[in-house]
Amino acid sequence: FYSRNGELHGVSLFDVSGHGIAPGLLTLLARSVVHNEFSAGSDLRLAQVIERANRTLVRELDAIDNYLTGIILRFTHNRVEYVNAGHPDLLVRRASSGEVLKVEPRDREFKGQFLGIAALEGKFTTAVFNMMKNDILVLYTDGLIETRNAAGEEYGVERLEHSLASVEPSLGANDITARLMADFNAFIDPRYLKDDLTLVAVRRSGDAEWSRDYAI
């Protein structure tokens, strides 16, 4: 979470491949690198921020096989900038309609490559959209949607979307995550919970005027 003067300016979620000491050290490195680039890159496109971070990670991870996927968001009033580096889709629940959508441009390929791999180093794309009062954003790692129940069925994105659609939009972010996790835990078999799992909910609590320039 990136905040300044008590105001939330951005959120990121990254997932490192593998388990153990090396991925743990990579997590610490990536957290520092992305935070520094986000703080220093307020006048850059968000895609440029992640490209700069990726160049540093590629240089530092020269002989390491691990990589990262991730999402990074930057907030300016009701305007949200969004970059995806090979990560599960960002979801938005629109308070006005109750509809849950994957955030993705309709007119171009959007999702970028993994981070920290020299052979994949390239450009990323920034998507920009509005977030209005009581709209909810949900970020998550693949451990959430890939965990199975006793019958071997994955929880999946559709069940997550259905769970998010049923949430009361005026709830606070802590209550939203608790409701989503309750639905998840009611479905899965704990024996299949073998991957790390992170879920983040962001709700816009303030009013904002709609800007057609930033619709997606």
Image (spheres, rainbow, N blue to C red):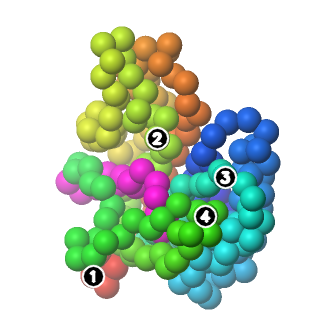
Instruction: Check if mark 4's residue and mark 2's residue have beta carbons within 8 Å.
Output: no
Q: Residue at x 23, y 76 (%)?
A: 107
- Give the mark nearest the N terminus, 4 or 3: 3
Disc 4: which residue: 117
Within 10 Å of the Cα at label 1, are there few (<14), some (14-19), or many (20+) other Cα atoms? few
Which mark lies nearer to you, 4 or 2?
4
Question: Hey, which residue is sitting farthest bottom in the picture?
Answer: 43
Disc 3: which residue: 65
Q: Quadrant of residue 129?
A: bottom left
Within 10 Å of the Cα at label 2, are there few (<14), some (14-19), or many (20+) other Cα atoms? some
The secondary structure type at the circle numbered 4 is loop
Q: Is residue 172 above or below residue 191?
A: below
Residue 174: x and y in percent read 54, 38
Instruction: Check if mark 4's residue and mark 3's residue have beta carbons within 8 Å.
Output: no
Residues in magenta, as a range: 83-97
Asked whether 127 falls inside the magenta stretch, the response is: no
Q: Amino acid at mark 1?
A: Arg
The answer for how far apart the CA atoms under marks 4 and 3 are is: 8 Å
**Residue 212, numbered circle:** 1
Instruction: Check if mark 3's residue and mark 1's residue have beta carbons within 8 Å.
Output: no
Q: Quadrant of residue 44?
A: bottom right
Q: Residue at x 30, y 56 (%)?
A: 102
